[in-house]
Image (cartoon, rainbow, N blue to C red):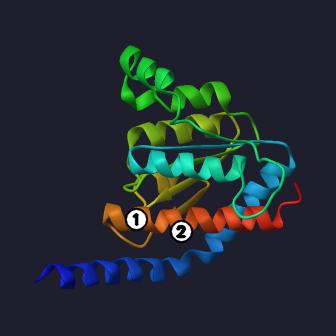
Amino acid sequence: MNKQNEIQELFEISKNTIEKSKSLGIIIEQVSNKIISCLQKNKKIIIFGNGGSAADAQHMAAEFIGRYLKERKSYAAIALTTDSSILTALGNDYNFNIIFSRQCEALVNKGDLVIGISTSGNSQNIINAIKTSKKNGAITVSLTGGNGGKLKNISDYTIISPSDKTPHIQESHRIIIHIICNLVEKYSKN
């Protein structure tokens, strides 16, 4: 296969994953409505993930704090992946599996909404953080892929990208995040 054919094939795979993601419309709407409700009650959105999913968490928080498409009041959102001192201290003093749950223990309050992003659905530090957040009374959302992993059984809402390949799951997650941001901004009264 030459490189041009490979490029076209990769575009086709991505296109098919995005096309299949349309089937997630109901759960995306439900999560968007929960976020809107949370913000209207002056609660916050807390987002976290590892690697590319950490970047997605930061991207989503930036869309909420700044703006997606229109000028509006800032939404309360925090990405737990941005404080390198906290992440390295917790990883060093405890272990990597508690870097998010320890932050959730301190920051998540009843009625907040947390979003854990894990392409496999099996990242232990995301699982621990979702469990801690539930104990604190938060609404829990997971963005995953494949079969949803362990997160699908413990999260209140799980959006499962229709792929088992990390790059394509991440592509789907980015579009889902943009759709959620669009809906929240359009329909929120804040």
Q: Quadrant of residue 9?
A: bottom left
Farthest top residue? 93
Q: Earlier in the sequence, mark 1 or mark 2?
A: 1
Type of amino acid under label 1: Ile
| Residue at far left of view | 1
Local crowd at mark 2 within 10 Å, few (<14), some, or many (≥20)?
Answer: few
Q: Would residue 74 be found to the left or right of residue 4 on screen?
A: right
Helix, strand or loop at label 2? It is helix
Q: Quadrant of the C terminus?
A: bottom right
Residue tagged 1: 169
Residue 61 in view of the camera: yes
Taking the image as shown, residue 2 lies to the left or right of residue 160, namely left
Residue at left 52%, top 28%? 83
Q: Is residue 18 left or right of residue 73?
A: left
Quadrant of the rendered image containing residue 103: top right
Q: Looking at the picture, how far across and down is residue 10, in whole percent? A: 28, 77
The mark found on residue 175 in the picture is 2
Residue 160 seen = no
Question: For the point 43% across and 37% down, which residue is it?
Answer: 125
- Which element is circle 1 on? helix
Question: Which amino acid, by three-letter code, is at mark 2?
Answer: Ile
Distance from Cα at disc 1 to Cα at disc 2: 10 Å
Q: Quadrant of the N terminus?
A: bottom left
Q: Position of residue 170 (x, y in %)?
A: 42, 61
Q: Is residue 48 above or below residue 117?
A: above
Front residue of 142/64: it is 64
User: Disc 1 or disc 2, which is closer to the eye?
Assistant: 2
Q: Position of residue 40 (x, y in %)?
A: 86, 51
Relative depth, front residue between 118 and 178? 178
In depth, the one of 142 and 66 nearer the eye is 66
Q: Which mark is residue 68?
A: none
Residue 155 percent location from the top left of the image: 56, 52
